Image (cartoon, rainbow, N blue to C red):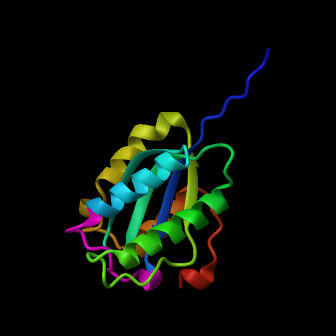
Amino acid sequence: MMTSYRQILYHIVFRTKNGENTLSQDNIRDLYSYINGYFRKKKCHLYRINGTENHIHLLCEIHPSMAIADFMRELKVSTSLWLKQSRYFTAFEGWAEGYAVLTYAYRDKDMILNYIKNQQSHHQLISFEEEYKNLLEEAGVLIDKRYFP
């Protein structure tokens, strides 16, 4: 008898509309808790979440029955509605249109966990735009120059 196996770690990055600093760090744990609940509801696993006022990083596994594009669309719609209803994120207008989904081997898990864990100190040295471009280049993703002048 044969069974199916899979093991795919996703590093997902998405940002606020126009990169605005609308994710108040004073109440960000509430958003992270909401996202964690969303993952559990979808039978997915969230290893780490962190970010700054204008973007979020996730390290996760997505249930194999879900297409990543569908998962991200539903996650962004759900969190956007939640944020707009929250009294803590009154400046939030929405998420930017795109996102990055990068895959990693399980042996890279600790490296990515630490990278995500240290977002606040990391962004004292580098902007989101620089970080995003570096992540894409390191992953070998062809970058659309219209978004990176």
Q: Nearer the viewer, residue 13 or 108?
A: 13
- Res. 50 visible in picture: no
Number of callouts:
0
Q: Residue at x 64, y 77 (%)?
A: 144
Q: Nearer the viewer, residue 142 or 83?
A: 83
State the quadrant of the N terminus.
top right
Q: Residue at x 45, y 39 (%)?
A: 109
Farthest residue, direction right: 1
Residue 70 picture location, percent across and down: 65, 61
Q: Residue at x 47, y 54 (%)?
A: 38
Residue 105 picture location, percent across and down: 55, 38
Q: Residue at x 28, y 65 (%)?
A: 28
Q: Is residue 114 left or right of residue 147?
A: left
Check the image and report above or below for 80 versus 43. below
Residue 44 picture location, percent across and down: 53, 45
- Res. 89 visible in picture: yes
Most frequent secondary structure within the magenta stretch: loop
Residue 39 included in the magenta stretch of the image: no
Check the image and report above or below for 140 versus 108. below
Residue 97 picture location, percent across and down: 57, 78
Q: Nearer the viewer, residue 51 or 115?
A: 51
Residues rendered magenta in the picture? 17-28
Check the image and report above or below for 143 versus 118. below
Q: Is residue 3 left or right of residue 102?
A: right
Farthest residue, direction top: 1
Q: Quadrant of residue 64?
A: top right
